[in-house]
Every structure is written in structure tokens, then in C-alpha cells.
Image (spheres, rainbow, N blue to C red):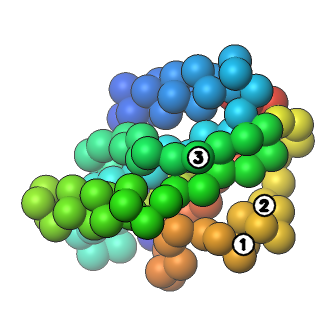
Amino acid sequence: MLVTCTLNHVESTLGFLSTAGRRHIECIVLWLGKRNGDQFHVEEAYLPDQVAEEDMFHIPPASMTKLYAHLRAKRLMVAAQVHSHPREAFHSLADDRWAIIRHEGALSLVVPYFA
């Protein structure tokens, strides 16, 4: 699947991640958009309400409900989750276990050093 994302969305994603990083906490941003065949265009960098620490993040149930309502209202889907790590970039066992998106073609990107 080809995923396209504007520089503006990349910059806002990195801004969210680095703002949290200055507080020494992880952060997750979701890339929302629309699929057209084997292509996906990111239309929004969405910052969900979340609880985070230096080495973890969690999206509470109320925030997931808010996300689902947002997706329905705008007729979007989640193409990627982008989150920060305090050190190296890798997909941890916790990242695998608690991934928000699991559909084929979805991306899970990890940005090192709190962006």
C-alpha cells in the first residue's frame, strides 16, 4: 500500500512528539485519512488524549470512544500510528501487544529520542 502524507502533517506530528519529549514522556499521533484502492492519503495528524510516561503511553477508553466518533463523523480511517521512544527506535513487545491499528497495510512508526 502506498501512503502519502504532506510535509505539514509530518511537521505537526514531530511537533506533538517533541513537545511531549521535552517533558520526557512518550507520545502517540495517529495519521487519519482515506483509502483509494491500494493508496492511502493522510488527511489529518490526530493527537488523541493519552496518559504517558517516559517509556509508555496509553489511550484511555474515553479517548478511544472520542477517536471512533471523530472517524465516523469525518469518514476517515487510521492508516498509521506514530509514537516516540526515549532512546532507539524499535517496535517493542508492548508496541506489538497494544497496537491500536492491526489491519493489513497499516503502519506503526517509532521515532527515537523523543523526536
Tell me where residue 61 appears, x and y as whole percent. Answer: 43, 66
Q: In this view, does 79 lie above or below 87?
A: below
Among the two numbered marks 2 and 3 on one chain, the one whose residue lies closer to the N terminus: 3
Badge nearest the viewer, 3 or 1: 3
Say what secondary structure mark 3 lies in: strand
**Quarter of the C terminus within the rendering:** top right
User: Label 3 to label 1, Cα distance in Å?
Assistant: 18 Å
Q: Which residue is the site of mark 1?
A: 96
- Looking at the image, can residue 91 be seen? yes
**Which residue is at 71% across, 76% downward?**
97
Which residue position holds label 3?
A: 51
Q: Position of residue 56 (x, y in %)?
A: 74, 50
107 to the left or right of 75: right
Upstream in the sequence, badge 2 or badge 1? 2
Q: In which quarter of the image is residue 32?
A: bottom left
Tell me the amino acid under the disc marked 2.
His
x and y percent of residue 24 in the render?
Answer: 76, 27
At a point 82% along the width and 54% down the height, the residue shown is 90
Marks 2 and 1 close (CB-CB < 8 Å): yes
Q: How crowded is mark 2: few (under 14 residues within 10 Å), some or many (20 or more)?
A: few
Q: Is mark 1 on a helix, strand or loop?
A: helix
The spot of residue 68 in percent (x, y) is 28, 66
Helix, strand or loop at label 2? It is loop
| Tag 2 residue | 91
Q: Which amino acid is tagged 1?
A: Asp
Q: Which of marks 2 and 3 is in front?
A: 3
Instruction: Inspect the image, locate mark 3, and give the three-letter code of the amino acid beneath it.
Output: Val
Circle count = 3
Q: Which of 92 and 9 is in front in this view?
A: 92
